[in-house]
Amino acid sequence: MSCFEIGSASAFGAWFTLPFSIKIKRPICSQLSSYQARKEYKSMKKKAKTAVYAVVLGSGLHADGSPTPVTAIRAREAFALTQEVKLKKLIFSGYRAPDNTAAKDKSEAGAMAEIVKSEAKTLGKEAALPPLCLEEISLDTLGNAIFTVEHFLAGEKPGKLIIVTSPFHMERAIYLFTQVLSPEWIVEGRPSVEWEKETRQPGAAAALERAREFFKELKQGDIKAASAKLRARKPYTK
């Protein structure tokens, strides 16, 4: 597990504040009491200080270690996100599926990170990238969620997590990450375009039910219990 920075990317790793001061005058308006004004002000400050993280989920490698079309599509969507939102971390999640035959030193996470760096270099925006983190253990979506949170988010103050994945995959991904993060986290989706040859949509509902079954007896945010349960079953036990 690793994170690395490009250029001055660490600047985006810090909490951000409003670039101006706000002074509340009483009455703020005829409809607001001084108590309401203070409440609004505190709410604005809280929103301004909420750190935003993103995770992009892999979807396979070719035998030569290059990304499949879906993996590449998701990576490019993650790069687009970096141009619109200041991220504290961008996490690339995925080793590969258990039956994938790519070289052992290749991972979905690494392939996606290379795409993002290449896109940034082409546009001369390498210095604007946030710290890039590689989660290279997971073999499936359940592993994506558990290992991403366990290694990169569990020690962070609750903020906002944006999940980048395909439309057919989004509902399950949001559910899984919501289960392993504490309730204070905000979890949102950033769908990529759907690959024109995607055929996995019909299985999405059944996959979501399996995910719900896994968490049926687990408390939301109990990452230790979720990780222990995952590591005790195939394919992680091999």
Image (cartoon, rainbow, N blue to C red):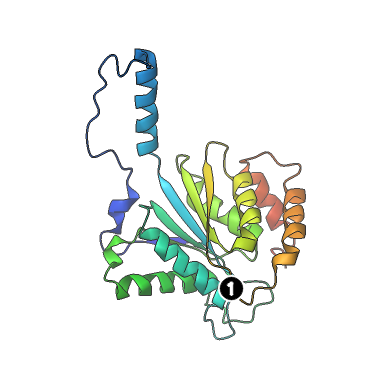
Which residue occupies the foreground of this view, 95 or 83?
Answer: 83
Instruction: Give left or right: position of 42 versus 172.
Output: left
Residue 93, position as x, y percentages in the image: 53, 63
Dot 1 lies on which element?
loop
Which residue has dot 1 on it? Answer: 195
Which residue occupies the foreground of this view, 37 or 13?
Answer: 37
Crowd around label 1: few <14 · some 14–19 · many ≥20 (10 Å) = some
Above-or-below relation of 222 to 74: above
Residue 202, position as x, y percentages in the image: 74, 66
Task: Place residue 144 in its image quadrant.
Answer: bottom right
Query: Residue visible at 60% across and 45% down?
Result: 178
Q: Amino acid at mark 1?
A: Trp
Q: Quadrant of the C terminus?
A: bottom right
Query: Residue visible at 61% across and 41% down?
Result: 221
Instruction: Give left or right: position of 234 versus 44.
Output: right
Instruction: Give left or right: position of 75 versus 140.
Output: left
